[in-house]
Amino acid sequence: MKNLKLSATAVAVGVALSSFGSAAFAADNGKATATNVAFADFTPVEYTTKEKPNVIVITMDDLGYGQLPYDETSFDPKTMENREQVATFKIDPQKAIEAARNSTPTLRSLMDDGVRLSQGYVAHAMSGPSRAAIMTARQPSRYGVYGNTDSQDGIPTSETFLPELFQNYGYYTACVGKWHLSKITNIPVPEEQQTRDYHDNFVTYGDEPGQPQNRGFTYFFGFHPAGTAYYNSPALFENREHVKAEGYISDQLTEAAIKAVNRADAIDQPFMLYLAYSAPHLPNDVAAPDVYQSKFNTGSKTADNYYASVYSVDQGVKRLLEQLDKNGQLDNTLIFFTSDNGAVIDGPLPLNGAQAGYKSLTYPGGVHTPMFMYWKGKLKTGKYDKLVSAMDFYPTALDAAGIPVPEDLKLDGVSLLPYVNGKNKGNPHEALVWLTSFSHWFDVRNIPFWDNYHKYVRFESDHYPHNPNTENLSEFTYTVRTNDYQLIYTAEDNATRLYDLRDLQLKNDLTMDKPQVVEQLKKIARDRLNESVAPLNQINQPKYQKIVDALAR
């Protein structure tokens, strides 16, 4: 990282420096001083951006644990024997394994040269709350978010997002890709432009309080809803301006990410980039450009489309790394990677590998994701096998940059740096807790819906199928994981089950054998419940009460 030309040292005051006018900074001695702050209780903290690391958080959308070469156990054909599949994605297990192995050579290289967080979990099995937890380093139940239904009006503005702190300390901050953290309004495109795929049919606006620029990002390019079309998306925005889609969405997002890092280089600032690719989230009915598509021949066109979208992200990351290297930024860039949740049954094998469960469930397949960190020469490379969370990205990034966590923030995430580098031999987390929705929308129970959904979108049927497993029609769970066990309570059947943490297929219920462990983990869930607030959305409050009642017993 090159030194800052105008302000190698900044005064961090706990308010956004971006709100200061240029006259607020004196450059004659290389220092910046806030001159328009009139707080009697403010304590200035001197901070230099010289040699500070860049930070990139990369997320993929609905990428399964087994759909890239992350864990060899995912490629055991025995775990795929007689596996139920959505009809359009049916492929031979060996073809699936080959496609998954070939999908991410760049990401594989970063994993090999970084730290695989082999017990890495996201804080929710659905996109909105999972991403909110990354941005806040706090369990979403602390601010009333138990599912996408609660987050549909945006994440409360009382929460401090990670880029706000980086921006306060002189970083250039950029968000590229999927936002899904603000209240949205859908405006239909002209009827003659509409298709049966809803991703084609709406210009989706994010509300002003939830705009990325109001949550700490200097620059935004991307989309506000849960998903977008791969071509001709009507939902793209650059900052607050509605813009035209150009080519394949992964490529356009890569171009925006390169633009952001080049901007940081031009103004001589370290940067924090949140790069949230849309792939491989549905729709998967169109082919990728041939440079990606030609690599896959699984026997299913839809599966080829899926894996080509994964590969497009990998190659986009490759292009970004090459640009960082050209700019002289790469060697001092800390990179985090995760999927926002597990794979959807509406996708190709190996899905979530040997794990039970899918997106929207707190079973391993829903929340145990491919997760890693990379920072050239700064991390002890290899596998780290203690319990970690995507919520840890936030404090780890701050620690790397030497930015203190504000005293009034109660974070659930912790800095992983002392743990992965071997300075701290303890556990980053004694336990992780999920108080969330528990929906079968994306698992095998809903295969009839997905089969008929594809028929509808492809005009093979005029009937839009009923979905009996939406989040609003589903119940809640409390789930606790320690470094040894996982306890999963499901309100739908009022059942509590205990498994060894490494029993990823949930085959051996230990509830009767280890009643003391069950009670210990229930107490952890009860303590977290006492620190949480009721759901923001009224429809979830009766479901939440069932969890309260279950933990009171």
Image: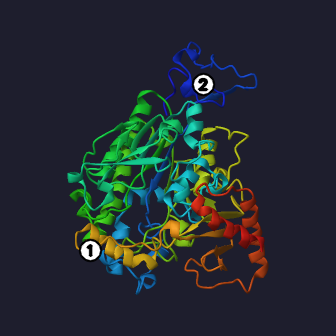
User: x, y (%) of residue 113?
Assistant: 49, 56
Residue 425 place in picture, x, y as percent? 72, 59
- Using the image as rendered, state which of residue 339 and residue 236 is in the foreground: 236
Q: CA distance from mark 2 to mark 1?
A: 56 Å
- Residue wearing tag 1: 300
Q: Amino acid at mark 1?
A: Ser
- In the rendered view, does 220 fall on the left or right side of 502? left
Say which element carries label 2: strand
Q: Earlier in the sequence, mark 2 or mark 1?
A: 2
Label 1: state its secondary structure: loop
| Quadrant where the C terminus is found in the figure | bottom right
Q: Coloured how?
A: rainbow
Q: Position of residue 538 (x, y in %)?
A: 59, 58
In the rendered image of this protein, does residue 347 appear above or below residue 197?
A: below
The answer to whether any part of residue 343 appears in the image is yes
Label 2: which residue?
A: 9
Quarter of the image holding residue 83?
A: bottom left
How many neighbours does mark 1 have within 10 angstroms: few (below 14), some (14-19), or many (20 or more)? some
Q: Residue at x 65, y 20 (%)?
A: 37
Picture disc at residue 170 = none
Q: Is residue 360 at least partly visible in the picture?
A: no
What amino acid is labelled 2 in the image? Answer: Thr
